[in-house]
Structure formats: structure tokens, C-alpha cells
Amino acid sequence: MEIKGRKVKFTIRPCRSIEEYKACAALQKRIWGHAWREVYPARLFVVIHGMGGQVLGAFAPHHGLIGFVASMPAWHGERRYFHSLIMGVLPEFQNQGMAKALKWEQRLHALQLGIDCVQWTFDPLRTKNAFLNIERLGAVVRRYQPDYYGNIDSRSQRGLPSDRLICEWWLKSSRVRRAMEGARPRAKSTPPEARVTLPADDRTQAGPNLQKARETQLKIRRQLSGYFRRGYAITGFAVDRPQCAYLLDRLQNANR
């Protein structure tokens, strides 16, 4: 798939060589500032490809690999799905629709393989990720995992527990079809049953605001975990600066 963004034209296709898998490893260092011990190595992407997973890259002329997404086969009981292990875009190429394009291509490849659900994790404090996952892609969230990965040595995570939300992306659902058409997955006219607010500024994540980030993280952990235990799911994400909000409803069947 070839797409022309606002600043760069890029092509999305499967990665095909050990050099391209090595580039996927190197990008992680450039995007997140991970310590090398935190980086998924090239050999992992070789294994993912060999076991029937996906390693899709975004390539731009004169730049090479500028973004990628990787997912592996997984199972819940007898139900097969894909776990999307990682997705990243170099900072200088962000905000051009590349992340969304990578996910839609991931969806297409999954459906071709008979997969109807992709799951992945994201940091509850990352509001840009939340907006992409819930509003632009139509995913839902019903699980909160405190300190999921343990300590992570990176610029964005250093000093905070690695709390994660678990996205469920039901590829054939009406929510996802509406998102594909550019509509909001959740009906705007219907008020949510619950809201959990957080600052819109991702910079509360770490650095000089670390104590504030810890307090915000703990508040969100308690509130969302409580709602999930009572049968609620995140179905929308509202941006009203300087605040954002997770919108929650009772959800009987996410695959609709």
C-alpha cells in the first residue's frame, strides 16, 4: 500500500530481510530511547515472520524504514487472534497518518489470514495513543494491568510502573467499520455511563512532573479497574483541553 502523507510519501509492506528486521530493532532506540536490553531484537522479528505473524514496515524514499508494526499469533482457549507486540513511527514522521495506516494494513493482513481480532497494550497516560486506538480505530478496552512489564528503562517510562490497558480490536465489528468510514465508533448523541478524566498533556508522564504523573496514574488505575470489575468497557475517548476523558459503557458483546 502506497500513501502520500502531508510531508512524505511512504509505502507499507511486509519486512523481507534480516537488514529490515535489524532496522525495526534500531527504530525502537530512536523512538523511545529504550536501553538496548529493552529492545526487541531482529531475531524476534524473524521468528514472528516464521510462525505466521506480521512484521509490516513503512518505507519512504531516501529514508528507508520510518515506522513498523509487528504482531504474533495468540490464542484464548480455541479462539485465535493476533497480539500486536509493538508499533512505532520515527518522531519526525509522526502526525501524518502513518500509525493509522499501519494499523489498517495490519487489519487487512489479519483478515486475509482468517483473524478477526487483534489485541495490544498501551499506556493509560498516553492520550495520543488512546485517541488513535479508541476513536480512530474503534478498539474497546475492558482490562487494566498494573505494572504489566515491570521496570522499563526508557525516556517515557523511567520512574513509573508500566501500567497498561489491553485493547481489543474486533476487525469486523460495526465500531471498526464506522471508524474506517471516518465516523466516530461511539454514537456522539448518547451520553456515556461513566467518565474518567486525565490531563491532555503527555508530558505529565515523566521527567520533572514525575510525582504528578504517579498521582495521576494511581488515580486512573483505581477508577478504571473499578469500572472494569463492574462490567464497564472503554468505548470512547474525548479531548477537551486541558482535559481528556475515557468514556465508559456497559458492553455485552465487543464483537459488534
Image (cartoon, rainbow, N blue to C red):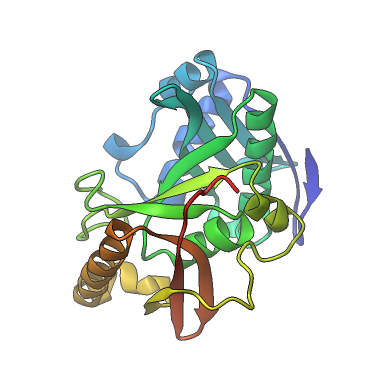
Tell me the quarter of the picture where residue 204 sits: bottom left
In the picture, the quarter occupied by the N terminus is: top right
176 left or right, relative to 164:
right
Q: Residue at x 46, y 71 (%)?
A: 247
* Image spot of residue 166 (x, y percent): 39, 48
Q: Residue at x 71, y 51 (%)?
A: 177
Q: Residue at x 49, y 25 (%)?
A: 80
Q: Nearer the viewer, residue 68 or 106?
A: 106
* Image spot of residue 117 (x, y percent): 55, 37
Q: Residue at x 61, y 51 (%)?
A: 99
76 left or right, relative to 3:
left
Q: Nearer the viewer, residue 106 or 168?
A: 168
Q: Residue furthest top?
A: 50
Q: Nearer the viewer, residue 108 or 44?
A: 108
**For residue 120, above or below residue 225:** above
* Image spot of residue 14 (x, y percent): 65, 27
* Image spot of residue 105 (x, y percent): 68, 39
